[in-house]
Image (cartoon, grey):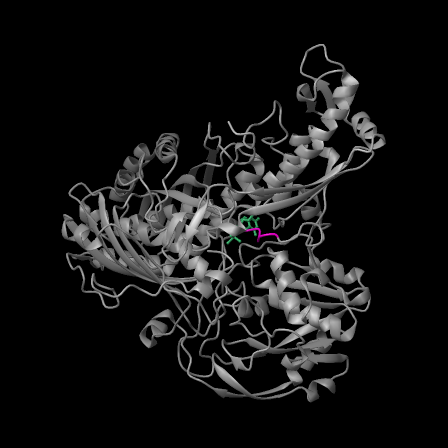
Amino acid sequence: MSALSERPAEPVVGRAVPHESAALHVTGQALYTDDLVGRTKDVLHAWPVQVMHAHARVTALRTEPAHAVPGVVRVLTAADVPGVNDAGVKHDEPLFPDEVMFYGHAVCWVLGETIEAARLGAEAVQVEVEPLPALVTVREAIAAGSFQGGQPRLERGDVEAGLAGAAHVFSGELEFAGQEHFYLETHCSLAHVDENGQVFVQSSTQHPSETQEIVAHVLGLTNSQVTVQCLRMGGGFGGKEMQPHGFAAIAALGATLTGRPVRLRLNRSQDMTMSGKRHGFAARWRVGFDESGRLQALDATLTSDGGWSLDLSEPVLARALCHVDNAYWIPNVRVNGRIAKTNKTSQTAFRGFGGPQGMLVIEDVLGRCAPLLGLDAAELRRRNFYTAGRTTPYGQPVRHPERLATIWQELLETSDVAGRQREIEEFNATHPHRKRGLAVTPVKFGISFNLTAFNQGGALVHVYKDGSVLINHGGTEMGQGLHTKMLQVAATTLGVPLSRVRLAPTRTDKVPNTSATAASSGADLNGAAIKNACEQIRERLAQVAAERLGISPADVRFAHGSVHGIAFASDRLTWEEVVTAAYFQRVQLWAAGFYRTEGLHWDSSRMQGEPFKYFAYGAAAAEVEVDGFTGAYRTRRVDIVHDVGDSLSPLVDLGQIEGGFVQGAGWLTLEDLRWEEREGPHHGRLATQAASTYKLPSFSEMPEEFNVRLLRNATEEGVVYGSKAVGEPPLMLAFSVREALRQAAAAFGPPGLSVDLASPATPEAVYWAVEQARRSTEHGHVDEGAPGVLPDQPGPDAPPMVPFSERAQQLMTRT
Ligand code: MTE
Ligand code: MOS
């Protein structure tokens, strides 16, 4: 086993400890960025001037009336920007725009002594606009040819030959919705200026280094003049990977111009109307199966709804394309991707980062086609699993495919799927107005950033003279338990009790040039960097201890705060004794650690390579019951078996699996983003901009029985202490709920019915699926044997789609 994955005896990793801030969270003592305002003097408050047009040119902006409002200190406009007037890295996102690109776009910001003063000031600002035609839906954008960014194509084999030789060919379409992050803590920044104009920004950001870079370019400063700190986030979920930068820049600009601290915190409706969300997609597909239901070919076009600017849309699309296979071997594949440009918020990263969208397409295909093939959907899925020696459409060998089979088997057995299927059949036969469904779906999710450069992590570990340890690393804490895991890693490597190690907030002046805490890679990258730093210190201390113990440094062991030799008879020193001795011998007691993931490469123009270090696997079985009169449903039971390698922190991982699953179920079944599609004064307005209209999963939607098991004997070679990433993959286990709803709806009709289900599968959508089943003598909208007739579907002779431009590749922050 590699040194990185090997665990010492009795490690602190693997222990079920609570989240390091759990007590602070539940007692309200945990500090979030906005909590600092009360501890800071002379703070100014920022309020946006939002323009309520989906698309318009600003013809006049009069700020003077705002100055007449008592308590207004300053109005920030484009004229104030000393550097680059752009909130992103692609230069398509003006911070102070002269063209309103979505309903609620902020064109300038007012600073006030109080929030109320800033709000009234913003109301007083006069903005004149000339309305422009707006595209609000992805369908409108496709019809108008409104696209942005590269149009990648992922291709393997010969799709046309695969379809021509297939025993069954089907085609269909699917349009599905995005998702609001609804982190508990909305976007927030607090900026002030130190001596010499150095800027310090506290920000709720998953990507402090990029927040630092954007603040620097807006202010015309170097990165070294700007420090960004993130104490913790009350949730990020991808929504704070890129979106915080502009808000931090506004606060920093205000602080440099006024010399006073500036706080910018969005209220919920501002956050919902101004910040980007998960991308909704429209997809068209043709698929071919052989006689026994084995996938032969998939031809698909995925169009994501990018909103008004690119943000992370290109890398999100790339990840969607790389996950359209999910867990299934498809010999011939052609997937074209493109990004619609619409007059909406700029859609962004959201847990899974396009992976869920790609996987939803293939899971929808299988769910719709299984009845047409005369197969049980779970059996169709299993039959198509990757097996040893197969590669993904982008050319990466699928390592450990046997884990899929093992997980599947364990799940079927432990949750008695076969027995419950029989019970459900009986129930359905005797209940005309209520039907149950039970579906099982797998997950295979690639771990690493596609863009190879991002796969690096850094750490700084200090051991003080008294033996106490302080660690700092490049990752941010958003509730996912990264810091808990990092404390456990440091304690394991140094052989000290967990209580000996403390963790300091993430800061760009401690660990520079960090990647976003994203792609679920936080523990892999920062954990390996912390381990590396701790090993440097431990090796130096081993020299000191070896001399004292009269043994070779290679024979020194560190465990439970004591230092001894490998022999039973060895003397023991305390950790503190060794540290003190090392200090007096002038041995360096701190170290910087670094890690780069080996063996990755990715060519984003060819969409080929081995972008992922490994795959995370899992499977879920969900049982639902649907009411035929209303479409209302409940989730009776969910069972999950998930692969986290050897868990670094089992309670944290359990929380991630449960939370990810529920968030996925929210996306697929409850959360219904509605934008005003009708022309008129509210065209493009987000109609669901509060918790009253945007339905989130809550206790009442929890599965009534919820069993999660971690896959055993799952050591992941070449990853810190044999673990695997866990943050995103479990979200996609929620496909099981959607597919169970489809099956329950189908049970209202004749046997073997293929039913279409809208996404999100809200009770209303389920009701229409039930209606379709009841009325149905024919199948859903899957057309059998109609290849090549889809508009927009490039045929075999179509010119290749434009690959990602060189520039887009360079600028891409994550692919
Ligand atoms: N869990 C909580 N509680 N809050 C969050 O914001 N974000 C998710 C996931 N789990 C999130 C979370 C997302 S989108 C990612 S990429 C990972 O955590 C990031 O953290 P990691 O790399 O440490 O897993
Ligand atoms: Mo997560 S979407 O990679 O921040």
Vertical placement of residue 593 versus 780, above or below: above
Q: Is the magenta stretch mostly helix, strand or loop?
A: loop
Drawn side of residue 410 relative to residue 578, left or right: left
Residue at 41% across, 59% down: 317
Residue 117 appears at what percent x and percent y? 73, 77
Q: Nearest the camera: 65 or 96?
A: 96
Q: Nearest the camera: 282 or 694?
A: 282
Examine the structure image and report whether residue 456 is included in the region drawn in magenta.
Answer: no
Q: Quadrant of residue 787?
A: bottom left
Q: Is residue 248 visible?
A: no
Drawn side of residue 776 relative to residue 565, left or right: left
The segment highlighted magenta reads 514-518
Residue at 48% across, 75% down: 685
Drawn side of residue 91 relative to residue 758, left or right: right
Drawn side of residue 99 relative to residue 75, left or right: left
Residue 90 appears at what percent x and percent y? 52, 68
Q: Quadrant of residue 229?
A: bottom right
Residue 222 appears at what percent x and percent y? 68, 64
Residue at 63% across, 45% down: 458
Residue 753 appears at what percent x and percent y? 21, 51
